[in-house]
């Protein structure tokens, strides 16, 4: 038995080739990491950005803005990123259909250079609008890449490694947050004269991606199922696999192609009206909305206040915040390296349950003003962050790819991205008013959301570990009340099996 386990584990590891690992880190480094970086980078220079707005409004218009106006302008600077993200998410389906997965990532790098240049030159030009527009443009890039990177990695990965590669972007999101926190320290770039540089550093990892990513192949599934380019598909598989049964993978793609009701990519409207994927669409909506309404954004926005109330001195709060960033990275890595062993469901259910427990703990610690309770509140904040990064931070993006076949996947990511960004924007806008109205009980609302998503996952979402995309669709067939004829609408088409690396022919059944 130990020998069998060792052989199985060795066989699984042989699928992780250097090209696969390289493209996963490269795509995430130049895209996903920027999302995390942009989330956290405006926190440290908040005072300096407000001072810049104050100075330029006085210079340009002779106005001396009060504290309320400066707060509104800074809030706009922060929240415009989410509006840009939602705009980018709306473009995903069209872009990946026209340019491919890798092609979209390469072309979208232009947005980062534009946004970074605007933010970096804003202080020199004395134009505050450049900061806001730059944040919006980088938000559009993040909205695109947050969907396209997991889509690309899920399509190039063998099914035994789809979970591992699918969570690599979430590690980089956590890493981006951590890097922004470290660079924002007063000893590094957290000084008044350096904040434009801090905001514009997003161009550095994007430059690395732009130089190297074009050398990697496009998604084999996109090339075969959507473009019908067999030779490019074989070349891409040989690049990513180097060894293994390429023939079997191509046959699995052919089987999925035969199951598609349309060879064309579906629009968002067609996806929402397709009864064959009703439960998949509902699942994507639940996990993506639940991911943002779990309270994680509120925790990120108000971590400093919670630490301050816990008695941590102001000069040390920045270092405590960096510590939470390190916990995010470690938790993300833990989820990434255990997902293929544990599966998607345990990480989702366990993560949301633990977050719900910690949200309830914050409410209890605030209600009972005992000396030791403030330390419990700090522990609960760390627990929410760790629970989120282990599973709920990355699994929703992964299963969005896994629950849909090729023709439905781009529209599914558009829906998921829009719901995710809309929820992100809503919680950032509503939470201050919610906290005023309900006090510490607002965290009980997050607790209910977390428990609700965990229960939904337990009863509705099947385990997708080591399953093909077609097998996962078949698992939902009963829930969607699909008969076999609907599941294989193109079964009258027969595809000739490829001889070695020959051509692929289509024949009508007589």
Image (cartoon, helix red, strand yellow):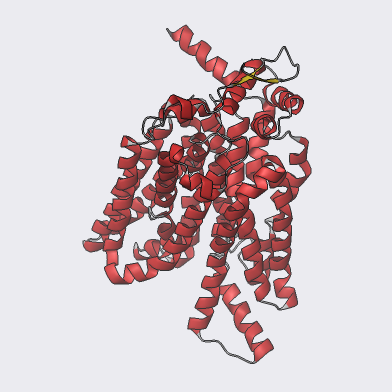
User: Which one is in front, 221 or 370?
Assistant: 221
User: Outermost residue toward the front?
Assistant: 510
Residue 391 seen in the figure: no
The answer to whether residue 415 is left or right of residue 217 is: left
Q: Position of residue 405 (x, y in %)?
A: 54, 34
As drawn, 192 above or below 23? below
Name the residue at 76% across, 16% down: 502
Query: Picture coordinates of residue 255 (x, y %)?
Result: 57, 22
At a point 41% along the width and 54% down the height, the residue shown is 296
The reply to whether residue 268 is visible in this rendering is yes
377 sits to left or right of 474: left
Q: Give coordinates of residue 288: x percent, y percent.
A: 45, 48
Left or right of 386? Residue 27 is right
Residue sitting farthest toward the bottom:
62
Q: Looking at the image, which is closer to me, 256 or 311?
A: 256
Residue at 55% of width from left, 40% of height from top?
Answer: 409
Residue at 69%, 24% (x, y): give it. 237
Q: How many marks?
A: 0
- The quadrant of the picture occupied by the N terminus is top left
- The quadrant in which the C terminus is found is top right
The residue lying toward the viewer, choosing from 140 and 484, is: 484
402 vs 196: above or below: above
Instruction: Find residue 482 and report its image quarter.
Output: top left
Indicate left or right for 21 with 456 as reference.
right
Q: Above or below — where is 508 with respect to 323?
A: above
Q: Position of residue 488 (x, y in %)?
A: 51, 26
Q: Quadrant of residue 199?
A: bottom right
């Amino acid at each position: 038995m130990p020998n069998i386990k060792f052989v199985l584990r060795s066989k699984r590891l042989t699928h992780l080739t250097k090209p696969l690992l390289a493209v996963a880190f490269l795509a995430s480094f130049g895209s996903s990491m920027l999302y995390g970086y942009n989330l956290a980078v405006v926190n440290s220079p908040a005072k300096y950005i407000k001072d810049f707005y104050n100075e330029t409004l006085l210079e340009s218009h002779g106005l001396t803005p009060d504290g309320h106006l400066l707060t509104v302008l800074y809030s706009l600077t922060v929240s415009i990123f989410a509006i840009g993200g939602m705009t980018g998410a709306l473009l995903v389906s069209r872009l990946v259909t026209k340019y491919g997965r890798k092609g979209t990532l390469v072309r979208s790098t232009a947005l980062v250079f534009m946004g970074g240049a605007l933010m970096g030159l804003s202080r020199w030009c004395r134009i505050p609008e450049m900061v806001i527009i730059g944040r919006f443009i980088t938000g559009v890039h993040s909205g695109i890449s947050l969907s396209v990177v997991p889509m690309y990695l899920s399509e190039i990965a063998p099914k035994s490694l789809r979970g591992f590669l699918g969570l690599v972007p979430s590690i980089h999101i956590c890493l981006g947050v951590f890097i922004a926190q470290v660079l924002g320290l007063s000893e590094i770039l957290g000084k008044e004269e350096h904040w434009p540089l801090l905001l514009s550093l997003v161009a550095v990892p994007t430059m690395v991606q732009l130089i190297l990513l074009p050398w990697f192949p496009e998604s084999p599934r996109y090339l075969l199922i959507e473009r019908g380019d067999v030779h490019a598909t074989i070349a891409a598989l040989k690049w990513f696999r180097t060894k293994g049964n390429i023939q079997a993978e191509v046959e699995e793609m052919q089987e999925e192609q035969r199951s598609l009701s349309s060879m064309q990519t579906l629009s968002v409207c067609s996806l929402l009206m397709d009864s064959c994927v009703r439960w998949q669409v509902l699942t994507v909506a639940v996990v993506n909305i639940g991911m943002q309404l779990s309270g994680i954004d509120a925790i990120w926005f108000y971590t400093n206040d919670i630490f301050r109330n816990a008695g941590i001195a102001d000069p040390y709060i920045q270092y405590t915040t960096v510590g939470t960033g390190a916990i995010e990275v470690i938790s993300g890595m833990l989820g990434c390296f255990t997902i293929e062993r544990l599966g998607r469901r345990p990480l989702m259910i366990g993560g949301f349950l633990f977050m719900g427990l910690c949200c309830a703990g914050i409410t209890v610690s605030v209600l009972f003003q005992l000396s030791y309770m403030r330390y419990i509140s700090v522990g609960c904040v760390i627990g929410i962050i760790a629970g989120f990064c282990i599973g709920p931070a990355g699994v929703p993006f992964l299963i969005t790819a896994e629950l849909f076949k090729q023709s439905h996947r781009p529209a599914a990511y558009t829906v998921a991205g829009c719901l995710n960004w809309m929820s992100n924007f809503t919680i950032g806008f509503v939470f201050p008013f919610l906290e005023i109205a309900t006090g510490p009980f607002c965290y009980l609302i997050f607790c209910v959301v977390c428990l609700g998503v965990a229960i939904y996952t337990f009863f509705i979402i099947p385990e997708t570990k080591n399953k093909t995309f077609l097998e996962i669709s078949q698992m939902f067939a009963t829930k969607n009340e699909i008969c076999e004829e609907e599941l294989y609408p193109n079964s009258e088409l027969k595809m000739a099996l490829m001889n070695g690396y020959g051509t692929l022919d289509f024949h009508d059944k007589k």
